[in-house]
Image (cartoon, helix red, strand yellow):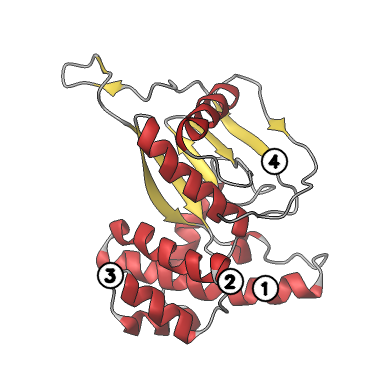
């Protein structure tokens, strides 16, 4: 989610679409999956759709995603030009991001995907509000203690939120949004897509995104969205 959706890149050094990584002897190991980072804000429906696509990509391409938080509230700090409704949404968006950062700090980054899945399904599919009941139910589903709900209204983990946010956003620049994906030296915002491609269609989109994002000097593809987020 961003005020200027598209696919934009900052790092343009090519990364192999095959996902091959150096083997023990320093030669490429075709069987080793590529490692990709995915930065998300749980409040963004477009990032949610892209995350479900990424999980489908893992099934058909040699790539594995690690999950990290970013914050639309941090991204939009100090922006007085935003509509009041959007500014209010940014205040509410702090809650799930803080809980996610607290969960990762206390229980390891591996809990972020199940927690994101539990939060995102409630918010984007079930249209639940960001409140204590929603947070507690998602934490329970993810196998995490419900006392993490307290992090939603605490600034204890804000430094961790900002550090993770900048780890992702510094790779692509601050005029984009969420999600950010990084593979090797290539990083980009997006793709913004609805509905989420599945199966081989997901793999073909991954191939194409890596191809264009890894092209030196490539920065943007964009067209006006004429559909809302479609969840299926």
Of mark 4 and mark 2, the one earlier in the sequence is 4
C-alpha span from label 4 to label 2: 22 Å
Report if the CB atoms under discs 2 and 3 are less than 8 Å apart: no
Residue 6: which numbered mark, if any? 4
Report if the CB atoms under discs 2 and 1 are less than 8 Å apart: yes
Residue linked to disc 2: 93
C-alpha span from label 2 to label 1: 6 Å
The quarter in which the C terminus is drawn is bottom right
> Looking at the rendering, which quadrant does residue 20 occupy?
top left
- On screen, residue 81 versus residue 221, left or right, reads right
Residue found at the very far front of the displayed protein = 232
Which secondary structure, mark 1?
helix
Which secondary structure, mark 3?
helix
> Looking at the rendering, which quadrant does residue 23 occupy?
top left
Observer-nearest of 217 and 32 = 32
Residue found at the very far top of the displayed protein = 27
> Looking at the rendering, which quadrant does residue 104 occupy?
bottom left
Of mark 1 and mark 3, the one earlier in the sequence is 1
Residue 106: which numbered mark, if any? 3
**Residue at the (41%, 45%) spot, across then down:** 55
C-alpha span from label 4 to label 1: 21 Å
Residue linked to disc 1: 89
C-alpha span from label 1 to label 3: 27 Å
**Badge 3, how many Cα within 10 Å: few under 14, some, many 20+?**
few
Residue found at the very far left of the displayed protein = 24
Which secondary structure, mark 2?
helix
Of mark 2 and mark 3, the one earlier in the sequence is 2
Of mark 4 and mark 1, the one earlier in the sequence is 4
Report if the CB atoms under discs 4 and 1 are less than 8 Å apart: no
Q: Position of residue 97 (x, y in %)?
A: 49, 68
Q: Position of residue 195 (x, y in %)?
A: 61, 47
Q: Position of residue 41 (x, y in %)?
A: 54, 60
């Amino acid at each position: 989610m961003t005020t200027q959706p598209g696919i934009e890149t900052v790092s343009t050094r090519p990364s192999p679409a095959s996902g091959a990584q150096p083997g023990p002897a320093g030669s490429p190991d075709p069987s080793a999956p590529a490692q990709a980072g995915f930065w998300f804000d749980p409040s963004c429906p477009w990032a949610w759709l892209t995350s479900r696509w990424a999980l489908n990509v893992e099934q058909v391409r040699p790539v594995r995603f690690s999950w990290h938080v970013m914050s639309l509230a941090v991204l939009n700090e100090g922006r007085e030009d935003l509509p009041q409704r959007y500014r209010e949404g940014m205040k509410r968006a702090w809650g799930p991001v803080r809980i996610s950062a607290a969960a990762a700090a206390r229980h390891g980054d591996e809990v972020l995907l199940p927690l994101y899945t539990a939060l995102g399904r409630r918010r984007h599919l079930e249209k639940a509000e960001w409140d204590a009941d929603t947070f507690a139910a998602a934490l329970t589903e993810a196998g995490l203690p419900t006392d993490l709900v307290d992090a939603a209204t605490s600034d204890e983990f804000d430094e961790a939120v900002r550090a993770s946010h900048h780890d992702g956003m510094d790779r692509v620049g601050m005029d984009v949004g969420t999600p950010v994906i990084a593979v090797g030296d290539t990083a980009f915002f997006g793709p913004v897509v609805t509905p989420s491609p599945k199966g081989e269609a997901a793999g073909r989109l991954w191939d194409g995104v890596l191809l264009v994002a890894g092209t030196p000097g490539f920065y943007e593809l964009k067209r006006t969205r004429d559909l809302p987020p479609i969840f299926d």
